[in-house]
Image (cartoon, rainbow, N blue to C red):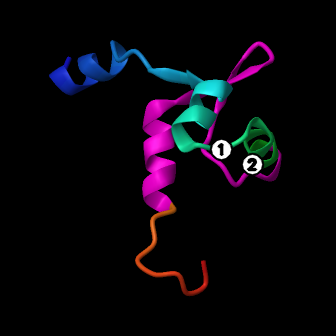
Amino acid sequence: MDQDKIKKQNHKMELMTQDELCAYLRKSTAWAERSRFEGTGPRFVRAGRKPLYPIEWITEWLLESASDNTVNV
């Protein structure tokens, strides 16, 4: 088995709770709830009823929403 596949299989996903995400982004919990409902925030997974945010997905979401100017933002 190739080393990259082994690393991916053994990769432990680092997760943030909604409160940690909001503190990190300096946003309210209402923003997080609304963005989940509208599908405009970072992707998430559920552990029971609680949404959890993989740090990799937060980073991807931030990079995708990066802008070079304020026109049409």
Q: Is residue 62 left or right of residue 18?
A: left
First in sequence: mark 2 vs mark 1: 1
Q: What residue appears at the point 42 percent right and 56 percent down from the top-left corner?
A: 63
Q: In this rendering, is residue 48 above or below 33?
A: above
Residue 2 seen in this snapshot: no
Q: Which mark is residue 27?
A: 1
- Residue pointed to by mark 2: 35
Front residue (pair 18, 23):
23
Give the mark toward the camera: 2 or 1. Answer: 1
Asked which secondary structure carries label 2, the reply is: helix
* Count of numbered labels shown in the rendering: 2
Q: What residue appears at the point 81 percent right and 47 percent down from the top-left corner?
A: 34
Where does the N terminus fall, quadrant-wise? top left
Q: Give percent across and percent down for residue 2.
A: 18, 22
Where does the C terminus fall, quadrant-wise? bottom right
Front residue (pair 7, 12):
12
Front residue (pair 55, 68):
68
Front residue (pair 41, 27):
27
Asked which secondary structure carries label 1, the reply is: loop
> What is the quadrant of residue 44 in the picture?
top right
Magenta stretch: give its range: 37-64
Disc 1 packing (10 Å; few <14; some 14–19; many ≥20):
few
**Residue 51 covered by magenta stretch:** yes
Q: Is residue 1 left or right of residue 50?
A: left
The amino acid beneath tag 2 is Ser
Quote the CA–CA distance across marks 2 and 1.
11 Å
Q: What residue appears at the point 80 percent right and 52 percent down from the top-left corner?
A: 38
